[in-house]
Amino acid sequence: MHTGLKGRLAVAPLEDSLDELRTWFTSPLGRTILSAQKKILSRELHNLFGYHLLQLSVLPEARLFAASRINHCFSLSPKSGLSRKKISGISDFHSLPLPDESIDVCVLHHVLDFSENPQQVLKEAARVTIPNGYIVLLGFNPWSLRGLNKQFLQVFSEKAIWHHHNLRVGRIKDWLNFLDFSSAKASYSFFNLPFNNKKYLRNSQLSSRWGWAEKCPLGATYCLVARKDKMCFTPLKPAWEVKPDIVPAAVAKRASNANQNISGSAMILPLRRRKIINRQ
């Protein structure tokens, strides 16, 4: 139970609200929003290539990467008890057990919305993404009909779906730019009233027929695709460390007079013959 207004507005840990979020995405409104997101993901992931794809989602068992051409796609969950056939492991999203620059494409599905520290989650995703790799990020748009509705429901309702961060697209872009990601492009989905009614949702999908609708920043959810612009450098040896092919050798200096011995050493080229003249 939340105590006080501050407690009602707080975002619970993702592992605590995961079950409730999974239940909401099975409702008519949740299924409609998820279907619209999968449509955008299918188009975006189809054009991204690499060796490894990581999915971090509030629905760990959902195969949001079904349209990807990447062979190795896996999903991590912040909570145990899920089917091991659909997830690859359990991890805290604030500290991923993956080496630096090891993932080609990282999909973040509402994990920034429902994480206690969204900046740290995004930082971890950026850390494991290779240079020229991509982050595909999906979240709830606060500047939408659903976002305005959430401002009131988060005060009077204790459901986890209404207690999440209000992360604007511009704010996410600023975070991505700070982490060396460039020019994130945004697409929006679900422009209908957020009524959880199956009949209404089935007969009110007119915006899905308009191609320009995805660019309108009033959709309930957004999808950001950003590329990591960190450059790779190949270390080169300094010029003074390069050894020449021919090196002078130190040999003993010969005496120039038979009656006079000269000791010491001198630098002469190898295979060079010298004539010895004996004077009487």
Image (spheres, helix red, strand yellow):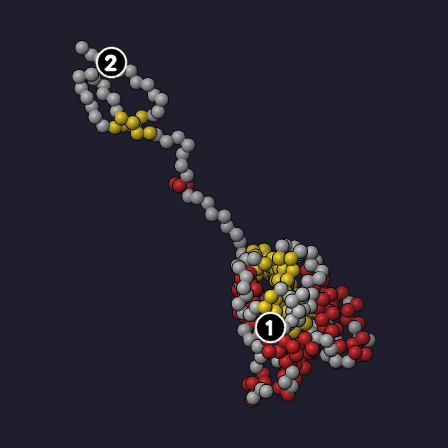
Q: Nearer the viewer, residue 222 or 42?
A: 42
Q: Which mark is residue 277?
A: 2
Picture coordinates of residue 176, whole percent (x, y): 56, 65
Q: Residue at x 63, y 76 (%)?
A: 18
- What secondary structure is marked by label 2? loop
Indicate left or right for 36 with 53 as reference: right
Q: For the C terminus, which image quadrant?
A: top left
Residue type indicated by callout 1: Lys
Cβ–Cβ under 8 Å for marks 1 and 2: no
Q: Position of residue 131 (x, y in %)?
A: 56, 56
State the image coordinates of residue 60 (x, y, percent, origin top left): 65, 69
Give the residue type that dot 2 points to. Ile
Which of 207/129 is in front? 129
Query: What residue lies at 73% left-to-right and 78% top-to-bottom?
Result: 27
Using the image, determine if residue 226 lies above or below residue 119. Answer: above
Name which residue lies at 53% across and 67% down: 95
Q: Which mark is residue 41?
A: none
Residue named by callout 1: 79
Q: Position of residue 261 (x, y in %)?
A: 19, 21
Q: CA distance from mark 1 to mark 2?
A: 94 Å
Q: Is residue 187 visible?
A: no
Q: Earlier in the sequence, mark 1 or mark 2?
A: 1
